[in-house]
Image: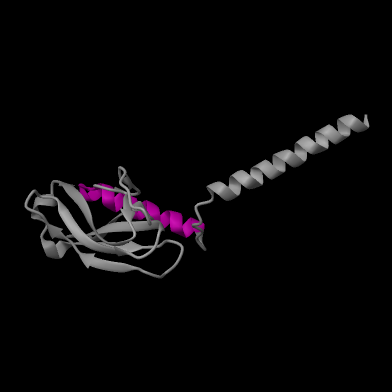
Amino acid sequence: MKAVIAVVSALGLGAVVGAVVVGTRSFEGTVVDHPYEHGLSWDRDHARRRDSGLEVRLRDAAFPAGSGRAAFTISGAAADSLGDRDVSVRVRRPESGEHQRETPARRQPDGSWEAPVLLPMAGRWELAVIVAHPDGVIEFPAAIVVSNAGGREEARNGGA
């Protein structure tokens, strides 16, 4: 009987340790003070992006640390009427308020857009394409990864 209790205890302890290990390795590090209000705000922003008729796609979701260029496309009914003063890019680290920068974007001859970005350190970043729309400013955020070695992968657009 003691052996059964020891085995069951060991299995229970192993399950707890396993859950802690998996939880710490999969935690994204993003916590908000007021999750309900944050969710309502996200829903409003998502509806504004959808109702704008615009779609933003980043060319890359992985960037090398340092100075670079973010390339993206904007499509939809109102995309052709956008000028250089209507579009900018903001990069920020979600974990901190440091290194947040917004720079103007420029339309390229092929119809795509580019903006200079400064990503001084490796880690998870948010890159938001900001579009001035008749109904107000609309942000199209995307999660990006900055590495010391660089690299490219398909964009994972958070709201686009």
- Percent x, y of residue 109: 6, 52
Task: Check if residue 101 falls in the magenta segment.
Answer: no
Does 80 sit left or right of 94 as displayed? Answer: left
Residue occupying the far right of the picture: 1
At horizontal 59% and vertical 47% (from top left) the residue drawn is 23
Q: Nearest the camera: 64 or 107?
A: 64
Looking at the image, residue 138 sits to the left or right of residue 11; the answer is: left
Residue 13: quarter of image: top right
Q: Position of residue 30 (x, y in %)?
A: 49, 57
x 30%, y 42%: residue: 154
Q: How many circles with numbers are drawn on the protein?
A: 0
Q: Whole-percent x and y of residue 83?
A: 10, 60
Q: Quick check: 123 left or right of 150?
A: right
Residue occupying image coordinates x 93% and y 29%: 1
Colouring: one colour
Instruction: Reply yes or no: does residue 51 show up in magenta.
Output: yes
Tell which residue pokes out farthest to the left in this image: 109
Q: Residue 121 sits in which quadrant?
A: bottom left
Which residue is at the far front?
149
Query: What's drawn in magenta, residue-wise?
Result: 35-58
Instruction: Decide whether the magenta segment is chiefly helix, strand or loop.
Output: helix
Vertical placement of residue 2 versus 18, above or below: above
Question: Between residues 72 and 37, which one lies in front from this camera angle?
Answer: 72
Nearest the viewer among 150 and 27 is: 150
